[in-house]
Amino acid sequence: QLQLVESGGGLVQPGGSLRLSCVASGFNLTDFVIGWFRQAPGKEREGVSCIGSTGGRTDYADSVRGRFTISRDNAKNTVYLQMNSLKLEDTAVYYCATEGVAYYSGSGCSTNRRRYTYWGQGTQVTVSS
């Protein structure tokens, strides 16, 4: 069974940094596309970043490009989201997810949430002064 568990959220001041972790179990994360999404109160869930299988091609939403970095540690079966220069509008519950399809020869990725089937429980990120 594919499972994802997020951690690393918290309260941070504007301009600060956080690193979110997404630990996978039940599958080898290397072969799967992983996406990070967020949902603020009263808003739809939106794609933040994603990383493809094997080769690890990445993509970012325009709102976080240059501030957030997605990476993968295959030995730990974990994907990270390093968030720098945080803004008030980054406040949301952050989720990681996977399509649930293995791409053994590598792949790109998409931040379209409708492509993702398996989701973690989320971790709260609050940016406040």
Image (cartoon, rainbow, N blue to C red):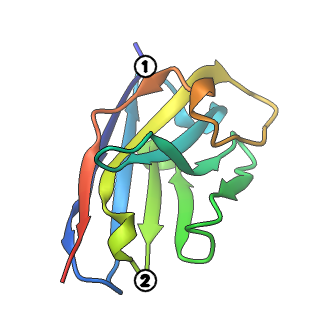
Please report whichever mark, 2 or 1, sits nearer to the chain's N-terminal start.
1
Quarter where residue 65 is shown: bottom right
Q: Which residue is mark 2?
A: 85
Query: How much space separates mark 2 and mark 1, taking CA atoms?
Result: 32 Å
Query: Can you give x and y, in whole percent of width and height, for residue 71 in the image?
Result: 55, 59
Relative placement, left or right, of 127 versus 44 is: left
Q: Who's the residue at 31% across and 62% down the image? A: 91
Of 11 and 75, nearer the camera is 11
Q: Which mark is residue 34?
A: none
Query: Can you give x and y, in whole percent of width and height, for residue 31 in the image?
Result: 65, 32
Q: Quadrant of the C terminus?
A: bottom left
Three-letter amino acid code at disc 2? Answer: Ser
Relative placement, left or right, of 24 versus 28 is: left
Establish if 62 lies above or below 28. Answer: below
Residue farthest along the front direction in this orientation: 42
Query: Can you give x and y, in whole percent of width and height, for residue 72 in the image?
Result: 54, 53
Of 8 and 103, nearer the camera is 8
Three-letter amino acid code at disc 1? Answer: Leu
Q: Who's the residue at 23% across and 53% down the image? A: 124
Name the secondary structure under disc 2: loop
Q: Which residue is mark 1?
A: 2
Relative placement, left or right, of 56 versus 85 is: right
Name the secondary structure under disc 1: loop
Q: Who's the residue at 27% across and 33% down the image? A: 121
Q: Alpha-carbon neighbours of circle 2 within 10 Å: few (<14), some, or many (≥20)?
A: some
Q: Quadrant of the N terminus?
A: top left
Establish if 17 lies above or below 41. Answer: below
Q: Alpha-carbon neighbours of circle 1 within 10 Å: few (<14), some, or many (≥20)?
A: some
| In this rendering, the label closer to the viewer, 2 or 1 | 2
Q: Who's the residue at 39% across and 44% down the image? A: 43
Of 112 and 32, nearer the camera is 112
